Amino acid sequence: MKDLHTNTPLVTRTQGTGNDLVFLHGWGMNSGAFTSFIPYLTNSFRVTTIDLPGFGENAQHVPSPYDAESLAQMIAPYIPPESIVVGWSLGGLVAQRLALIGKDFKGLALKGLVTIASTPRFIAGPCWPGIAGDLLAMFESQLESNYNRTLERFLAIQAMGSDTARQDIKAIRGHISEYPEPDQHALKQGLRILSTEDLRQDIGRITVPTLRLYGRLDSLVPTSGIDRICELHPQADTVVLPHAAHAPFISHPQQSADILFSFASSVYQQKAS
């Protein structure tokens, strides 16, 4: 059974019972991206999904300025205490921001952090593998004329390399289409976050237990950059799925769920002891 909470400015959805996991989606998406993955977890956890402001059921809530800090500040009041926050792609940037502001934001008490196919800096730079700047610029210019076609191309790049790429794209597209379309300003500024946000000097200050999950075939978060992230955040656990791309929870749901279950169980056992 799903509980839809609409008595707050932001819509959140909760299902399952147990300790809390909160999921944040990637650019151009909404919480529908997790629809097929959540059933792998709800026997053991209470899972809450929150559409990023400007997206899905929260499309009408667009903070100004539209940046990762503002998104984190807006989402923070709706995260259950003692939650593990799981952020995919752009959602991973917001999740890292939440982990960084945790001690300073009244009422926010994260128990752990999981990033899926995410990084402290998405765009490539000197000695830093990432997304080519001209690719993000191309997406931004295409947005002006056709959001759906731009999203389709973005999905294709995300699934590139996966043996199940076609099925992965179809699955995500089908589920996110059940939610409202995103705000155009949020779409454009979301791409701007991907091209400008840089948490490399900050992630070493994240103190909650952290898991970073990657796909070896991911073209948006290249595995060549993982060692650099490990150097910046050595406290984090790192797992690379050898046959996954940018959406491992879609292409390898059972394996992803097992890894997440193991990490979360360990975190909550530490709490109990």
Image (cartoon, helix red, strand yellow):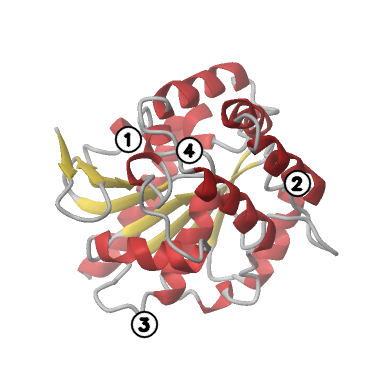
Picture coordinates of residue 121, whole percent (x, y)? 66, 61
Residue depicted at x 51% and y 49%: 186
Q: Mark 3 or mark 2, which is nearer the start of the sequence? A: 3
**Left or right relative to 141: residue 71:** left
Q: Is residue 100 above or below residue 171?
A: below
Give the residue number, with chain letter if any, for mark 3. Answer: 104
* Secondary structure under the numbered disc 3 in the rendered image: loop
Mark 1 residue type: Ile
Give the residue number, with chain letter if any, for mark 1. Answer: 38
**Left or right relative to 240: residue 62:** left
Question: Real-space Cα distance between discs 4 and 3?
Answer: 29 Å
Give the residue number, with chain letter if any, for mark 4. Answer: 29
Q: Is residue 36 above or below residue 106?
A: above
Residue depicted at x 24% and y 55%: 9
* Secondary structure under the numbered disc 1 in the rendered image: helix
Q: Mark 1 or mark 4, which is nearer the start of the sequence? A: 4
Disc 4: CA contacts within 10 A as few (<14), some (14-19) or many (>=20): many
Mark 3 residue type: Asp
Q: Nearer the viewer, residue 136 or 108?
A: 136
